[in-house]
């Protein structure tokens, strides 16, 4: 008998029963709060968008900082705004637990007059941070999706959990940005929303991952490739969904092969970065897809040790905390092959990331 896997997607009948989830369409409550928010858990609701003028906007509502689930509830909003010809801005809103609320019936997250709410199809987001107010509406074009239950278990006895729910794999976005001293500007584009939660620091479970989403012509894609830590067998955990004209055409992670090309060492984070990240998906003996993320620029290059100051920074350096988060923009291309012949190709701008939680192997 083969040993139990050290990391696995929860896809068995008993997993669905244990989690109270039905096979089939995602239900609104699944995008509601799935943890207590207290010690031993973390949770966040994430939105990103690529806008018509080349701007990108990312908004994340956290119950606490994801690397410290043992901490008390410490609600926080992070806004990353990158606009052509202007310095990138990273803004934070910190709240106390009484200033935070989140429904278990659906996505309705509030803190300090800001909100992130929706019903798996239409979402409204508002954040007031420093001298910037952003308001966004996201309307889904691709149905909510999850890989099996959306939960990955770690440990021979499923001791720990990491969960991922792409509530809106792709949608139309309308964003209004109001910066002090300038008139509000309304922009349109393409966006995405997902929801994550877990019960132990991700750095204990996962070494690193590539993750990205994009629209390319009639195609929309979410693709990720996660690598478990050594304790969990360095298990590779691919995740992918490809939709065409709003209908899912491929989502079997067992058929994905990751190819990294033109890899270099990033000077700031000291992490290996691939200029080309390719997800090769063999659907069957006849049909094959290739999703190619071609980097043009790095939007964010953040070392975790640099997110704290003073004695905390010194302690992080002494403890060899060298995790990093990098976000990229560039061109995403989807290619479809039939019997080895390229029959369709489409390209558009996209955003993707590299998260390094552990040491480079």
Image (spheres, helix red, strand yellow):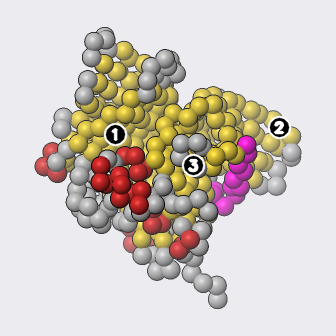
Is residue 257 on the magenta stretch? yes
Residue 356, image x and y in percent?
52, 54
Is residue 218 or residue 41 the one in the foreground? Answer: 41
Q: Secondary structure at mark 2?
A: strand
Residue 241 seen in the figure: no
Quarter of the C terminus within the rendering: bottom right
- Residue at screen point 35% across, 52% down: 313
Crowding at dot 2, Cα within 10 Å, few <14 / some 14-19 / many 20+, comes out as few
- Residue at screen point 41% across, 63% down: 319
- Residue at screen point 55% across, 35% down: 298
Q: For the magenta stretch, what is the residue range?
A: 252-262
Crowding at dot 1, Cα within 10 Å, few <14 / some 14-19 / many 20+, comes out as some
User: In the rendered view, does 336 fall on the left or right side of 305?
Assistant: right
Question: Looking at the rendered structure, which numbered label has been put on residue 270?
Answer: 3
Q: Quadrant of residue 227?
A: bottom right
Residue 131, image x and y in percent?
26, 23
Q: Return the disc, 1 or 3, that comes first in the chain's sequence.
A: 1
User: Of discs 1 and 2, which sits in the foreground?
Assistant: 1
Quarter of the N terminus within the rendering: bottom right
Q: Secondary structure at mark 1?
A: strand
The residues tagged by marks 3 and 2 sit, at their Cα atoms, a distance apart of 37 Å
User: What residue sits right under mark 2 in the picture?
Assistant: 342
């Amino acid at each position: 008998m083969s040993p139990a896997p050290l990391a696995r997607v929860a896809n068995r009948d008993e997993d669905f029963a244990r989690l109270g989830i039905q096979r089939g369409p995602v239900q609104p409550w699944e995008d509601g709060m799935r943890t207590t928010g207290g010690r031993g858990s973390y949770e966040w609701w994430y939105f990103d968008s690529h806008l018509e003028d080349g701007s990108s906007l990312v908004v994340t509502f956290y119950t606490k900082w994801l690397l410290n689930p043992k901490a008390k509830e410490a609600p926080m909003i992070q806004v990353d705004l990158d606009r052509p010809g202007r310095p990138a801005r990273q803004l934070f809103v910190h709240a106390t637990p009484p200033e935070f609320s989140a429904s278990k019936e659906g996505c309705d997250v509030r803190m300090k007059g800001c909100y992130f709410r929706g019903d798996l199809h239409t979402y409204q987001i508002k954040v007031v941070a420093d001298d910037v107010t952003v308001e966004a509406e996201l309307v889904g074009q691709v149905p909510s999706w999850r890989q099996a239950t959306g939960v990955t278990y770690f440990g021979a006895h499923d001791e720990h959990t990491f969960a991922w729910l792409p509530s809106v794999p792709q949608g139309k976005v309308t964003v209004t940005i109001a910066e002090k001293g300038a008139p509000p500007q309304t922009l349109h584009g393409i966006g995405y929303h997902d929801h994550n939660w877990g019960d132990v620091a991700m750095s204990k479970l996962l070494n690193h991952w590539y993750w990205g989403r994009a629209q390319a012509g009639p195609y929309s894609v979410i693709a990720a490739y996660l690598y478990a830590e050594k304790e969990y067998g360095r298990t590779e955990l691919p995740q992918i969904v490809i939709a065409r004209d709003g209908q899912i055409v491929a989502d079997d992670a067992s058929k994905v092969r990751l190819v990294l090309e033109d890899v270099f060492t990033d000077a700031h984070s000291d992490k290996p970065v691939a200029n080309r990240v390719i997800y090769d998906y063999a659907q069957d003996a006849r049909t094959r897809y290739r999703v190619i993320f071609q980097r043009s620029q790095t939007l964010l290059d953040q070392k975790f040790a640099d997110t704290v100051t003073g004695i905390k920074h010194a302690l992080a350096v002494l403890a060899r905390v060298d995790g990093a988060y990098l976000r990229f923009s560039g061109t995403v291309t989807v290619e479809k092959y039939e019997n080895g012949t390229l029959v369709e190709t489409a390209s558009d701008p996209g955003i993707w990331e590299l998260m390094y939680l552990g040491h480079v192997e």
